[in-house]
Image (cartoon, rainbow, N blue to C red):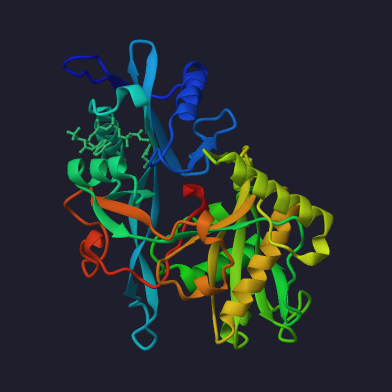
Amino acid sequence: MADHDESVTVVVREFQANKDTERVVTLENTCEVGPTNKLSLFTDMLGDPICRLRNSPSFLMLVAEIGQEIVGMIRGCIKTVTCGKGLSRSKPTLTRQIPVYTKLAYILGLRVSTNHRRMGIGLKLVKKMEDWFKDNGAEYSYMATESENLASVKLFTDKCGYSKFRTPSILVNPVYAHRTKISRNVTIIPLTPTDAVTLYRNRFSTTEFFPRDIDSVVYNKLSLGTFLAVPRGSYSVETWPGPDRFLLGPPCSWAVLSVWNSKQVFRLEVRGASRVKRAFAKTTRVLDQAFPWLKMPSVPNLFRPFGFHFLYGLGGEGPKVVKMVKALCGFAHNMAMECGCGVVATEVASCEPLRFGIPHWKMLSCTEDLWCIKRLVEDYSHHSLIGDWTKSVPGISIFVDPRDI
Ligand SMILES: CC(C)(COP(=O)(O)OP(=O)(O)OC[C@H]1O[C@@H](n2cnc3c(N)ncnc32)[C@H](O)[C@@H]1OP(=O)(O)O)[C@@H](O)C(=O)NCCC(=O)NCCS
């Protein structure tokens, strides 16, 4: 796979771990994402440029080369997800909603070296990646970017035919030096992967972006567990009857979430913070470590590579669901603290009602993560009622796959 530019020869080819890793890591290290005048977030891939793809069922990484120099890269993956819902026709008396699936491609980790921007390399990488998507039967392609990242937004919307699709929020909470207190009125029950898959398939499979291979997610070694919150006295670890009987008569309120160990995959680092900000953060941390019983919110050290846990599969119902979610997030905080994480993050739809139960710091979060989408093929494999997914109205919730983070 090679392509040539008129003035300089730019070769786009598949990434080869043995000969490209070092050069790709160097490029990634010098390539900041987003506006330059603000704090920026760097990704430390722990020496493995395809670490963010490895858990996807099908993936590809391409590099752009001028002579011996790697000047750009792009990653992509394909999987089957829910794009809408239909009605089951198997029993006329008992209609139930069923998911409508589509093959969806995702573009991530696009980088062009600062010395080679505006030469058409980004565009070339996207086009080559889309060729691979189409060859592999993907119907849609999407990407996520900060809405302020003008270069990225313009590249995809002006030049590549993508349109703005969804704007979920990334909610990030620091991991304090003290443990979070969990409400005594809530019982937290760890679920087995089998029970978690059944619960997710039963309740969330019609949610947009729900991965059909949810079992590969839940059974993945990076998935640290799925936890159910119920009102104290309704069920305990010993009396929980399993997902089927639970869903036939659930308590008035309940919530579920799973924890993904992103710390094992890559690390993040905040760069560009002033000395004053760093010193302030350190002071809060030292105080929190010295007096944990004060339960003082403290700023972790985010100015050197830190790991995080990602919360996915958040859902539930009932009048006290927000309280259940809060308890689960507190539980997840304590898990992350034991694992030495800097933050806990999650991503939810912009109008997700459960977000009120998710503790987060505004200064660390991103209220508008912009997802842009494009239809790659003319024919739809899915139900005609769904039509063009890119034109559909957003649902209340979205399923954010931890493999795409
Ligand atoms: C986004 C990025 C990959 C673009 O790469 P690039 O090789 O410079 O892009 P191209 O030269 O192919 O640009 C194609 C089009 O994108 C748009 N574009 C690219 N950079 C732009 C900028 N800084 N401002 C406005 N539009 C821009 C333009 O429409 C451009 O066409 P034009 O040059 O004819 O006007 C590059 O800026 C980059 O690596 N940024 C840092 C990493 C990042 O933000 N990645 C995206 C995360 S999703």
- Position of the N terminus, as image quadrant, is top left
Please provide percent x and percent y for residue 137.
Answer: 29, 45
Seen from the viewer's position, the closer of residues 64 and 88 is 64
The residue sitting at 42% across, 24% down in the picture is 15
Answer left or right for 358 relative to 28: right
Quadrant of ligand 1 in image: top left
Height in image: 82 above or below 90? above
The residue sitting at 45% across, 56% down in the picture is 366
Answer left or right for 359 relative to 396: right
The residue sitting at 57% across, 78% down in the picture is 322
Please provide percent x and percent y for residue 91.
Answer: 37, 82
Please provide percent x and percent y for residue 373.
Answer: 28, 52
Q: Residue furthest top?
A: 67
The residue sitting at 16% across, 51% down in the picture is 378
Can residue 235 be seen from the camera position used here? yes
Please provide percent x and percent y for residue 85.
Answer: 34, 71
Rendering quarter of residue 2? top left
Can residue 244 be seen from the camera position used here? no
Q: How many marks?
A: 0
Height in image: 265 above or below 49? below
Seen from the viewer's position, the closer of residues 42 and 88 is 42
Seen from the viewer's position, the closer of residues 164 and 292 is 292
